[in-house]
Amino acid sequence: MEVLLHKVCGRPASRTMTLRAAGPEDAAAFYALQNEVRAAMPHPEQFVPDTLENIARCLKEDLCIGGWDGGRLGAYFILRYCGQDAHNYAAFMGIPREEWDGWANADSAIVHPGYRGNGLQRKLLEAALARLRPGIVGIGATVSPENQYSLNNALASGFEIVCRREMYGGYDRYLLAKRL
């Protein structure tokens, strides 16, 4: 899927970014982008980073979409199929355990600062929704209450705040749900 970039590095632009399913061969690029974006955040605690091993596992087992500007990864989205795992966000939303298999976790959405302002978080989600595993009826997500940009994107994409709770070893988060 091609998306038109209207600005790059804060300047007007007119070029395309390719959104495509990513695989294990993209693990190093995903990991590097995660770390680069987090290092540039004024409040890095708003995003809890993942390990290279976990990213590689997600790229093998789950649904991951990368946004490529030529050979450069500029954005990505990871959607995890957690099933009956206790880390399934459905577990924290009061969803009965027998329904957890129908829920997926929007695990992370990363956009390099140079590509922000193009609606890429929403476009990555849309690309993922078009490729969802059959039987998925809802998606859970977490967002730091301080991360207004990501929170506003999630709300504009149809997510609703379910609750506010401590997650990831002590981080304040909104837990959001999107029913499909």
Image (cartoon, rainbow, N blue to C red):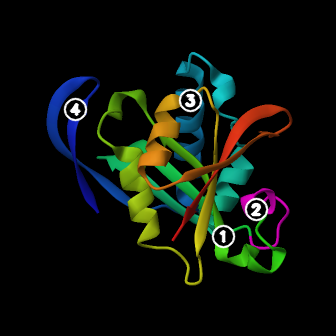
Mark earlier in primary sequence (4, 1): 4
Instruction: Name the residue beneath numbered marker 3.
Output: 147
Residue drawn where x is 73% and y is 67% of the image: 82
Image quarter of residue 143 = top right
Q: Residue furthest bottom?
A: 134
* Residue designated by label 4: 7
Q: Which numbered mark, 4 or 3, is in the foreground of this view? A: 3
Q: Which residue is mark 2?
A: 88
Q: If you read the primary sequence from the N terminus, does the residue marked by circle 4 or circle 2 appear first?
A: 4
SS state under label 2 = loop
Q: Residues within 10 Å of mark 2 (few under 14, many from 20)?
A: many
Say which of 71 and 155 sits in front. 155
CB-based contact (under 8 Å), mark 3 and mark 1? no
Q: CA distance from mark 4 to mark 2?
A: 36 Å
Type of amino acid under label 1: Trp
Calculate the distance from the C-alpha at mark 3 to the C-alpha at mark 2.
Answer: 22 Å
Other residues around mark 4 within 10 Å, as few (<14) / some (14–19) / many (≥20):
some
Whole-Å distance between the Cαs marked 1 and 2? 8 Å
Residue 103 got which mark?
1
| Tags 1 and 2 touching, CB below 8 Å | yes
Dot 3: element: loop
Q: Mark 3 vs mark 1: which is more N-terminal?
A: 1
Amino acid type of disc 2? Asn
